[in-house]
Image: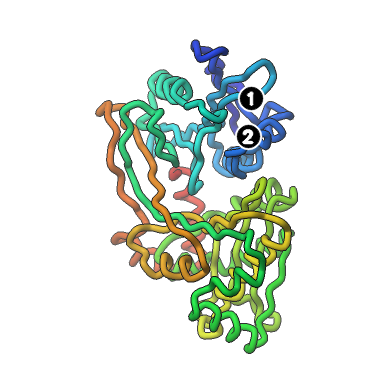
Amino acid sequence: MRCAAQTGDQREIEGKGAPTVIIDPLQRPDWDAQVEAHAGSTIFHGTGWARVLNETYGHVPMYVCRFDGKLLAEALPLMEVASRWTGRRGVSLPFTDLCAPLCPQGGDARNLYREAMDCGRRRRWKYLECRNFDVAWEGCAPSLEFYVHVIDLGIGADGLFERLDGAVRRGVRKAEAAGLKVEFSGDRESVRTFYKLHCRTRRRHGLPPQPFRFFESIQRHILGMGRGFVATARMGNQPAAAGVFFYHGGEALYKFGASDFALQQHRPNNLMMWAAARRCAQEGLSRLNLGRTSLSNEGLRRFKRGLGAAEKKLKYAKYDFLSKQFIVDVDQTKGWFNRVFSRMPLPVLRLAGAALYPHLS
């Protein structure tokens, strides 16, 4: 495990009203309370996600911040990902769908991006990637685009069900008629159940799974801290579908999903997603973010819209330090490698994921 406190990059530049500093949030006991005071904060801005990335992969937290006295005024979360295979780079933040900088209303993140760029030059990063698109990052251009879908939970459980597409409603009733039940838990056993489905789902899609220690860390630092749950749809004792959900402030986030393809005719995903949305609404949350969807994945896009979600575009930005320009990236979920991974036995596929993911972001 590594942390930014020992990197020597605790450097200040002149900013608006106060200097900008690079800190390690894991060394600040007040960080989560400070983050929660910002209306735009998400689960990814807190120490839970920072610990997951640092503990699992050794990524180094280097958060660019400006404080007003002791209060956090602005923050751009960054992780340094260092790999002998893929090089050293800054990412805000690895394995997230969206991570915008925190700024006061009416402010902008210009100085945060300037310091992040200076940090990248000092530390010889290959690139700086932000899971957000912000015109305050001078000269930025989109590198990738996705869809993002958000369900308004404020209409209540009855309104949510009526807003479902007819096919999704029929799927929910079909799952209930088949005897499927949904249970909610944040314990380690629920994560282990999810992970078994996750590995089989990833192989079906021709992709390696993240190592189990990644999900163990999520259980310890997020789910186990009361910031999320696993929803599992079961047919008797057999898990048919499962999803990992986070929540922060008034918003829930559907982060990971998996299912048993052999039971798809019973529509377990429909029931699991509907039950999770209903639970979030009953707990007083105002929104359920369904996460990003690749532009090419029309099936997943249609399913999320069928859940009653509003759709919009999500853009990222990526600066290449060698060419000194913003670059267009490639969504790397499809390619020749899908055929290779889909043919691997599950134990081999898990080993491949454990070997590859420390070098990815």
Instruction: Report the residue that reaches farthest toward the left.
Output: 323
- Identity of the residue drawn at 57% across and 59% down: 152
Asked where in the image residue 125 lies, by quadrant, the reply is: top left
Query: Where is residue 235 shown, x and y percent of the image?
Result: 65, 82
Quadrant into which the N terminus falls: top right
Which is nearer the eye, 144 or 357? Answer: 144
Locate residue 88 relative to residue 99 in the image: left or right.
left
Please determine whether, in this image, residue 34 is positioned above or below residue 147.
above
Q: Position of residue 80 (x, y in %)?
A: 49, 32
Could you say whether the residue bearing mark 1 is in a helix, strand or loop? strand
Q: Which residue is pictured at 38% across the width and 34% down the height?
A: 87
User: SS at mark 2?
Assistant: loop
> What is the crowding at mark 1: few (fewer than 14 residues within 10 Å), some, or many (at least 20)?
many
Front one among 271 and 149: 149
Q: Which of 313 and 81 is in front in this view?
A: 313
Q: Quadrant of residue 33?
A: top right
Amino acid type, mark 1: Leu
Q: In which quarter of the image is residue 60?
A: top right
Q: Which residue is drawn at 58% across and 86% down?
A: 174
Percent of width and height locating residue 162? 57, 74
Earlier-in-chain disc, 2 versus 1: 2
Amino acid residing under circle 2: His
In three-dimensional space, the C-alpha distance between marks 2 and 1, rounded to whole angstroms, equals 9 Å
Q: How many marks?
A: 2
Residue 335: image location, x then y, percent: 30, 60
Give the crowd class for mark 2: few <14, some 14-19, many >=20 residues within 10 Å: some
The answer to whether the residues at label 2 and label 1 have Cβ atoms under 8 Å apart is yes
Q: In this view, does 304 lie to the left or right of 126?
A: right
Task: Name the image quarter holding the C terminus.
Answer: top left
Q: Residue 116 carries which label?
A: none
Residue corresponding to mark 1 = 72
Instruction: Say the numbered circle drawn on residue 38.
Output: 2
